[in-house]
Image (tube, rainbow, N blue to C red):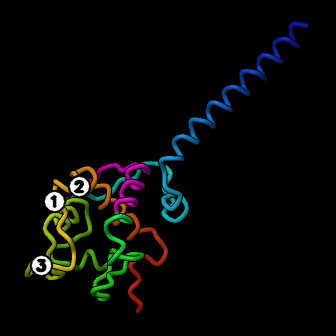
Amino acid sequence: MLNRFFVRNLLLITFVLVVCGSINLSAQAANIDSYIVRYLHITEPINLLVDAQGNTRSFSPEDLSIGKKLFETNCTNCHVGGATLPNPLVSLSLKTLKGANPARDNINSLVAFMRQPMTYDGSEENYWCRQVPESWLSLPQVESLAAFILTAAQKAPGWGAENF
């Protein structure tokens, strides 16, 4: 009789823990864009290069989801799938971002570009890309946007493909 009581309660406790755990996972997953998981294969925080000195910072799947949403809202008119419609020779591929002057292959340099867009060779202001002042997007938002772009450039199939 005692064993039966123990087993029943153990099963009940296990059931409650599983249900509560799945509710918590569902709530977390609701904040993560499916593209981040499916195509970028990000389910845990990742470290991204922050500066040219090799320093890194952790970005969560939620941070990347925020960045993706900002990209969709503000950048997809010209940058569909990492391409650059006004200038198809300058995509958002990692190779192209690294080749810019200055390079745009880390969070700080990409944020600096968004704050003050310059041409690919860095010689003058770029009027194709909108300037993103602090009054429009905060630093954490722009960093999430940069993190999404850099992660997509590294992991997304076809992102910024340069075979036109």
In contact (CB < 8 Å): disc 3 and disc 1: no
Disc 3 marks a residue whose amino acid type is Gly
Query: Does residue 50 sit above or below 113 in this rendering?
Result: above
Give percent across and percent down for residue 15. 73, 28
- Tag of residue 137: 2
* Residue 160 x %, y %: 38, 79
Q: Which dot, 2 or 3, sits closer to the camera? A: 2
Residue 55 picture quarter = bottom left
Residue at left 22%, top 51%? 138
Q: CA distance from mark 2 to mark 1?
A: 6 Å
- Check the picture and name the quadrant holding the C terminus: bottom left
Q: Residue beneath label 1, please? A: 133
| Residue indicated by mark 3 | 122
Q: Nearer the viewer, residue 162 or 78?
A: 78
Q: Would you say residue 41 sits in the magenta stretch?
A: no
Report the side of 62 relative to 144 (left or right): right
* Amino acid under disc 1: Pro
The reply to whether dot 2 and dot 3 touch (C-beta < 8 Å) is no
Is residue 138 placed above or below 164 in the rendered structure? above
Disc on the earlier residue, 2 or 3: 3
Q: What is the distance, in whole Å, between disc 2 and disc 3 at their CAs?
A: 23 Å
